Image: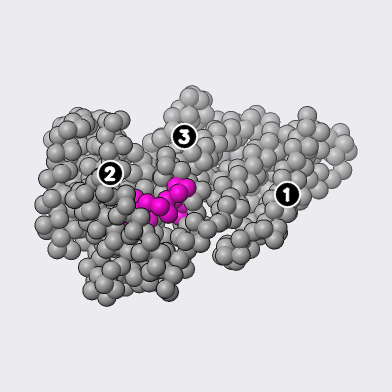
Amino acid sequence: MSDISVLSNQYEQLVATSDKVNNSVIAFKKKSLLDDAATKAKYPKLSISTEELATAKQILLLFLENIIKLIENDSLESDFIPAIILDDYKTRLSFKPYLKDDLKKLISELKQNQQVTEDDIEVLDSILSILDNERSILFRKLRTARG
Amino acid sequence: MISFVKGIFYDQSNRVTKMLSDLASPQINGEIDRAFLDKTIQMLEDLNAEIQILANSGDLDIDALAPYNIIRYNTFHERLLTIELFRYLVIINYGSPEEYFKKKISRIYTEVNCMQKQPIVTTISNSQDYYWALPSYDVIAVPKGEQRNLLNLPDLYHEMGHLVYNQHEVYLKGGIEPVINQYYNDEMQRVLTEQRDPKLIPFFREKNQRWISGWIMEFTCDFIATYLVGPAYAWTNMKLTTLSSSNDRVYKDIPSHPSDEARMRGIFYILEQMGHNAEVTQLKSSWQDFLTATNNPIPANYNYIFPQRIIEHLANNVLSGCQAIGLIAYNEQIRKFGKPISKILNDAWYELFRNPAGFKGWEEERISEINGLIERR
């Protein structure tokens, strides 16, 4: 009878993904801000360590490669996206026709340790936005789940 | 924008502090499980610490980070609401019905020989949300006033099943996953070799995924409940299915749950394996009449969604698993305890059929009897 136990497990998986990806994008955004001398001077507390960037890169590479697999329909499951929203997630990704090319370019840049540009961050923002939506929808389902 | 985003994080922290203050109140019922209360306080303190770390990091002062901070805020907010709904409200609303259920579930755990830590049963649910369990929090919720009813109580055993499954998943489901995967792989292969409709491929993939991610667990919890409470579980499930029938949902599956029709087939199979043949004959006859009367539509390709041999394979695994972890089956409970709560629940259904007009009084007497049983412990 309990939708809640299923939804709760899947929601927790999605929160873990959303947190990791959000924090990773923040790391690259901070790096981008620190590359600008004026911004650096404006926010003296702003900092990001090499280790934080390395972790962020590692997380994003795994996550983005998984998205490519999902877009190409090679994968029916994901370590990052819970099964219960996978179809909806893939549908939302499909609304962005250039996403696959943008992600492949970004993955290549990350692998070659190239500078992550503002354009790249915009791509990441669009992915984050989808994740945020899905997390919020799943949370509403969890809150209103019937037994 | 900066001051707004910063402000809502401080407001969030204040809400956490107020909840912590409520939980420290002497008015909190002393019967509440202390570990549950302490864990709730810990979760709120952890959340507050994370909000404080963020507030002190300087990130909230940077305009360019505002979109990411809003996502952080929303995630914290959802975490706070989750703690509020599944823990804080359970504690704040803990009263005499919960004390009654605490004794009752303790009695049931003894009768079925469940060695797990017993969950908190809370009455924060309602008739629409019905029974639900959150195994990660060790909470089972039942509708307010449920301590006065018997006919829904078999579903408490299903919710207990979720907690048992959480701990003993491997023993209970056994090797069913490769069997299911093989079945759908074979069907997908047949689509190619027999040139069937290509749309069947994504259809089979979806059903395969649903089996693995949700249906195995739900079937298993049905089977555990049937093993523990016998035919009464089938009648209670049939009562719940009545609600689905008005929405044409008897044969419909959803990602988290198999169809009611398939669940009933599984329950009947377990009852047959337990030797309840006479009861199954009566149940099947009523169920068939019910299906005819409600006349819900059967979806296309339904026979590929819940094949009987997969249901029976899983049911056999669950029966072996229940025995392996030492759970006591319904008939054995009767032999050991004479009149366990599960027996009273079965009697309730037969009394309802025998004398529906007099059932209310009979139910009140049996609830008093249960009170006597649990008070004597």
Residue type, label 1: Lys
Residue type, label 2: Lys
Residue type, label 3: Tyr
Identified at 30% across, 67% down, the residue is B340
Q: Nearer the viewer, mark 3 or mark 2?
A: 2
Disc 3 target residue: A89
Distance of mark 3 from mark 1, alpha carbons?
37 Å
Disc 1 target residue: B18
Query: Viewed as shown, does residue B188 lie left or right of B66?
Result: left
Which x, y percent locates residue B324?
29, 72
| Chain ID of residue with mark 1 | B
Give the magenta range.
B138-157
Q: Nearer the viewer, mark 3 or mark 1?
A: 1
Disc 2 target residue: B239
Viewer-proximal residue, B10 or A46? B10
Assign the C terminus of chain B to one quadrant of the image: bottom left
